Every structure is written in C-alpha cells, then in structure tokens.
Image: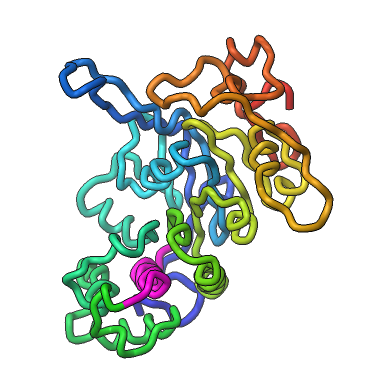
Amino acid sequence: MPFPEGGAHGEEEMTDGNGALLSLENICKHFPVKASFFSREVLRVHAVDGVSLDVPAGKTVGLVGESGCGKTTLGRVALRLVSPDSGTIRFDGREITSLSGEDMRRTRKMMQIIFQDPYSSLNPRMRVRDIVGEGWLVHGIASRREIREMALRLLLRVGLSEDAADKYPHEFSGGQRQRIGIARAIALSPKLVVADEPVSALDVSVQAQILNLLKDIQEEYGMAYLFVSHDLRVIRYVSDVVAVMYLGKLMEVSPAEELFVRPLHPYTRSLLAAVPMIGGAPREKIVLRGEIPSPLAPPSGCRFHTRCFMAEKICEEECPPFRESSPGRRTACHFV
C-alpha cells in the first residue's frame, strides 16, 4: 500500500550512529546576484553558512528565525531541491549529497515537502485526485484507474469529503488547500517531511486545525518533520527540538521545553522576549539595536554581534564555535 494502514514504513528505517534520520554537516549555500542592473559585478547572498543539524527519526525539529535568515533554503537543501555549495547530507544512513538520476528519484520517494503558500503550490489545471496521486504515477505505484479510490481514502484521512477528489484547487479555501498539500506530501509514506511555514498563510483558527492534523499524522505514521517557521508559538507546539537560525548560521539547538524555559543564546532570549504574553511571569525586556545586516555582506566574527546586548570585542573578531554548552544543548556564543 502506498498510503500505509499503520505506522510502519515499507522499508526498514536506517539512521546514522547518532540516531539521526537526516544529518546535515557543515552546509553552505550562497546565491550569486548582480550588484546592479548595469553592473557586471557579482555579489553573493550568504543564505546558509556552515550549518550542521540532525533530525531524529519520528521527531520534529523546529527551525525558527527571522525572515531571510536561511530557514527555507536549508529545508530545500535537505531535500536536495537545492544543491549545497559544500557540506554533506546524509539521509536514512546514506550520503545523498551527490546522488543523481534513478538513485535520487528513489530517495525522494521518502522525502516530501509541504509548501508555505497553499494558493500557488497546487496546479490549478489538475483535479485534486491527480494532484494527490501524481507521486503514485511517477513511481509506478498505481495506475490512473486506481488513483481515484486511493485518493479518496487519503482525502478522508486529512479531513476532506469524497467529492473533493473531482474538484479543482480554486474551489477550496486556504485551509482546505493546505490539507490537499498535506495529503500529497504523505501519499508516498515518506520518512521525512519538510514543512515550510505550512500555516503562516492561514487564519489562526485554521492554523490550529492544520497543526493538530500534522501531529496526528506523525503519531500515526511515525514520520519525522523539519518544521520551518518564524512563529515561536507554533514552533513550541509542534517541536521536540528547536534550532534557532540567524543570518545563515545556527545560534542555538536545544530540546524544546528547555529552550522555552531557559533560553541560552542572547538572540534566542531576544526572540522570546518579543513574544506577547497573557498572564504568567513577565519576560525580560530586551531591545535589539540596529537592523539585521545584509546577507550580501554579513558581519565578521559572530553574525549577531552588531545587535547583541552582550557583545564584546572578541565577538567582532572571532566567530564563536557551535559547541555543547550544557547536556543536550548547543550554542554559538563566547559567553554561554
């Protein structure tokens, strides 16, 4: 069955020695851009710079940071939708950094993505049954005659009615379209799903429904999520581990509950201080100075030092190592 009746995958799940289903090691990705329309000078956007991150099997790693920090690029590199300039990607016990052709096609069957925009991520000329079943056709799992029945079962699982199968994307609301996107992502029973801001374009009430659906599906089928979001409240709700990113680099990685109770990195502390609270103990008040530097010319030393309230001379001169600062927690800060 392409869409499992239970939580087991069709193949034995492999992990690296550290228990990671996905392991990103020292990933770098820069994008060339022209300095101006009339100039021949080529600049480089430092989207991701030396990032190492693990996603354990069956768990959710939340990737959080301000817009433009490289979260989406890292998620697409993880799926090899974008090739890294350097670094290593290991998935399911195998290095996939340079895979191509049929080997990469088979691997992609186990890696899927839920896109941010439910309005532009679905082909407006395809019926929903064909959108959901496209992966089954590509991988030779089902014929066109079989797809409708299989799509019906899957659409019911994500909370849509049977008549949705014969409709087109424009006939649905934003939340319903995202359910279709989720159905498409889980149709091949992947081991890993990258959820790229999957609820940011939805109303708050609909966000809760989609987040609960994603958690239910994970519990039922045992897949891992790399969950990309700028919303700390969403990240706290869904994540087992949280990775905090700033200007192309990781600032902190920590078990979710520990991070939200006692953030270590000054950038993480400033993010949490900016989250509105109703009742409870007041948060520390942190006001960051200046603007986020351009990824075309990131600061030397610690990327965050131009805005950091703890910055010293060493922060301008030396990039802090990303090291274990307490059991199970890693930070990139000279003073943590």
Instruction: Where is residue 115? Give x, y as percent.
Output: 37, 58
Which residue corresponds to the image point at 45% horizontal and 60% vertical from the top-left?
Answer: 198
Which residue corresponds to the image point at 68% horizontal and 51% vertical from the top-left?
Answer: 276
Any part of residue 118 in sight: yes
Q: Is residue 173 magenta?
A: yes
**Residue 308 as seen in the image, left or right of residue 107:** right
State the residue in front, 159 or 332.
159
Q: Residue furthest right?
A: 281
Instruction: Where is residue 209? Give x, y as percent.
Output: 53, 73
Instruction: Where is residue 48? Give x, y as percent.
Output: 43, 33
> Relative to 146, is 64 above or below?
above
| Bounds of the magenta segment | 172-192
Magenta region, main secondary structure: helix
Q: Quadrant of the N terminus?
A: bottom left
Q: Is residue 138 magenta?
A: no
Instruction: Where is residue 41? Give x, y as percent.
Output: 22, 15
Tell me how the rendering is colored: rainbow
State the residue in front, 140 or 183.
183
> Relative to 26, is 194 above or below?
below
> Relative to 278, is 203 above or below?
below
Any part of residue 111 in sight: no
* Quarter where residue 265 is shown: top right
- Number of numbered markers: 0
Q: Quadrant of the C terminus?
A: top right
Which residue corresponds to the image point at 36% horizontal and 59% vertical from the top-left?
Answer: 117
